[in-house]
Every structure is written in C-alpha cells, then in structure tokens.
Image (tube, rainbow, N blue to C red):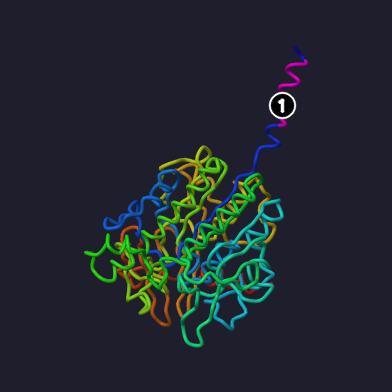
Amino acid sequence: MIYRLTLLAFMLLTSTLMARQPNVIIIFTDDQGSMDMNVYGATDLATPNMDKLAKSGVRFTQFYAAAPVCSPSRVGLMTGRTPQRGGLNGNVGLNSVGMPSSQVTIAEELKKAGYATAHIGKWHLGHSKETIPNGQGFDHSFGHLVGCIDNYSHFFYWSGPNKHDLWRNGKEVFHDGEFFPDLMVKEASQFIDKNKDKPFFIYFAMNTPHYPYQGSPKWLEHYKNLKYPRNLYAAFLSTIDERIGQLLKKVDDSGLTKDTIVIFQSDHGHSTESRAHGGGGYSGPYRGAKFSLYEGGLRIPAIISWPGHLPEDQVRNQLATGCDWYPTLLELCKLPPADHKIDGKSLTPIIKSADSPSAHEGFNWKSGRSWAIREGKWKLVVTGKKTELYDVPNDPGETNNLAGQSPEVVTHLKKMSQEYWQSITKK
C-alpha cells in the first residue's frame, strides 16, 4: 500500500514537472479601427473568427496601444516598454537605424526559456543584421522589414525607387503573385508542424488592414453596397479574418488549442491617410485615428484566449496597454519576471477576475509634438501650447475640455508626466 502511494505521488510529481509550457501566438493587426469587430460594436462587418476568439477568451474595452503609429507601437509589444524607453520615437524609415539591438524582446525571453520562436509578417523595427528579427530573438523570420507592402508583388511603394521587401531569415525571397496573408498562414503552419512537440512562440504580425486595401473578390462583392471607402476596408478586413481563422484551425487540427495562448491586438487606430482612401475604419464614439493621441488613435481591440486555463467569453473594463503582454506572458508561462526596467504590468489578475483593479496608476504617451497621460478617469493631451483635459468615462468622444475648470488636475498630471519622462533620461 505504501509502495503504491509512493508511486502515485512520484507519478503526479513527474506529471507536474513535465507539464508542457504553453505555446504563444500573438496576432497583431495593422491599422484596425477601435471598434472594427462585431463584438466591439461594428454592425456592418463579418468578423466571425475574431469574434470566436473573443468568445473563447477575455476581451478588453479600455486597451491602449503603446503609440498611435506602427513602429513605436511594436516597440511596446516587443519590449514591454514605452517606445521612448525602448529607444524609438517614431516610425522606422528606409534609412533609419531602428530599435536598438540592446533592447530585450519577449522573443529573447522565450527563446532563453527553450521556446522555438518565429516572426511572420511585418517587422518595421530595423533593417541591419542586429535589428532584424533574427537579431532580436527570433529563430525563424519571414516577412517584410518596412512599413507596408503590396500583398501580391511584395514591393514597398512610397517615394521612389520602389523596393522589393520580402525576406526569409535575412535572405531576400520571391513569391511574386502570391497573396501575402496566404503566405503568412502557410509559413506559420509549417513552423507549427516542425515545432509542435515543444513550446513555440509565433509573432504573427499582419500587414492588414493597412493600405493598400486588397480584399478578395468574394468580400468586395459582399460589401458592394457599403459606402466608399468603408466597402474597400471592410472587404479587406473580412479577407484577413478568414486567414486568422485558417491559422487558428491549424492550431486546433494540431491538437494544440488547450496548449496555446493566443493574443490578438491592433497596433493602433485606423488610418485616414490618402493611401487608405481617406479612411474606411470605424472608431465608434471615439475621436481621432492613427497618429492621434485621442482615443480613436490609441484605444484598440485586444483579446487573450487560452481555453481551459483562462476565463472564456469575458469582458474586462480596466485600463491595459500593449506593453502589458510582455510581463503577462512571462507570468502565464511560469517564467521569472523581467530583471530590467519595463513599463508593462502583468494583466493576469485582471484576466482572472473582473474585480481586480487596473495594474496602472497612470500611463504616458508621446507622438510628434503631442504628449498625453491617463490616470483614473482623467486624460490630459498637450500639443504645443494647447492643453486639453477629458473625463474619459463620461466623455469618451473627448469633446468637453475641462482644463479650465480643473486646473489642479492639469497641474497634477503635468507633474506626473514630467517625472515619468525624466525617469527615462536618468541612467
């Protein structure tokens, strides 16, 4: 009897020690509007796969990008730091240095813990050997290094000369005529097949619905009665929703759904640039869009799903940010917390309980000539000499500037912000 009990205890201990660390997939969309999913309130879109992911997990309603533009937002995700602490203030251009290679990415943390790591899709954080994905913790990389590409020719069209921009592990590759989101799903599927017997991390960084809008004929027909440019944007968004569904089906068909944490997030609000036909995205009641520090530029859809381990079909209203996935993943993967200074806070308590307080006392942003800070219900936005104060829960559209009525709040928030930015410059 004692022998059987001892054997049982040993088996339970062995099972616990051998328990698989979860896989991690981060699906990062590009220029997706604040409310451009059915579960976020869009009534004119078909987004069944994104919605299904939300139903299987926890959806955030006050989730903020680390920045309202592409490269800095990715710094927040990759490093758990505000872009400025992460060494990048704006978008990385063709001749820019990029995010410093000294930054410690979540890929480096997971690789150190034995994970197979892959970047698939958009990078936009550097072009040199040290700053491309393979130099920043990724075993495998497939995708483009600059801000956007044509999805069929894989050329970057901006100001000439135009540049072909498709790479696999630092080597230029050519897949002329093949739809880039399809190539991404294929690459991710092959990586899963190769690494399904050990924990893996896939950063699935979609270049969509970022312009050029290139929805499939099926969806262009489906949305033909929508007003321009919403029809083009919607067709592209539903086209990529299908590819997200294909990726998640691959995980399920591989028997890995309950072994895989899936995080979904847009990098910032929708674009109103001329290349994006002047718009098409939807920010609901929120003011602003991409490039803006108003809610429409920063407040984004965000979801985490891990069936069997985290709550399902739940909504969280606490403030959270793109910097927070870094420490959250370290905790969920049972890894030590970062041993260097980061700005992100673990969302695990919030994910597990709707009653947990926000992890952030306040959060800061800078973009161009503007800066902003959010603390509690208050949000301060300063551009040059213009100061704006908003009670966000009661004024989500940021239409009633209370700076003149609450000067003490303005003074307090300016002091908090100044202290934060000074802390970054200190060695």
Q: Amino acid at mark 1?
A: Met
The quadrant the N terminus occupies is top right
Range of residues picked out in magenta: 3-14
Residue 42 or residue 335, whichever sits in front? 42
**Residue at the spot x=40%, y=72% of the render?**
211
Q: Which residue is mark 1?
A: 11
Q: Residue furthest right?
A: 3
Q: Is residue 404 magenta?
A: no
The quadrant the C terminus occupies is bottom right
Q: Is residue 263 above or below residue 234?
A: above
Q: Residue furthest left?
A: 225
Q: Quadrant of residue 2?
A: top right
Residue 390 or residue 149, whichever sits in front? 149
- Element on which disc 1 rests: helix
Residue 279 position, x and y percent, is 32, 72
Main structural element of the magenta stretch: helix, strand or loop? helix
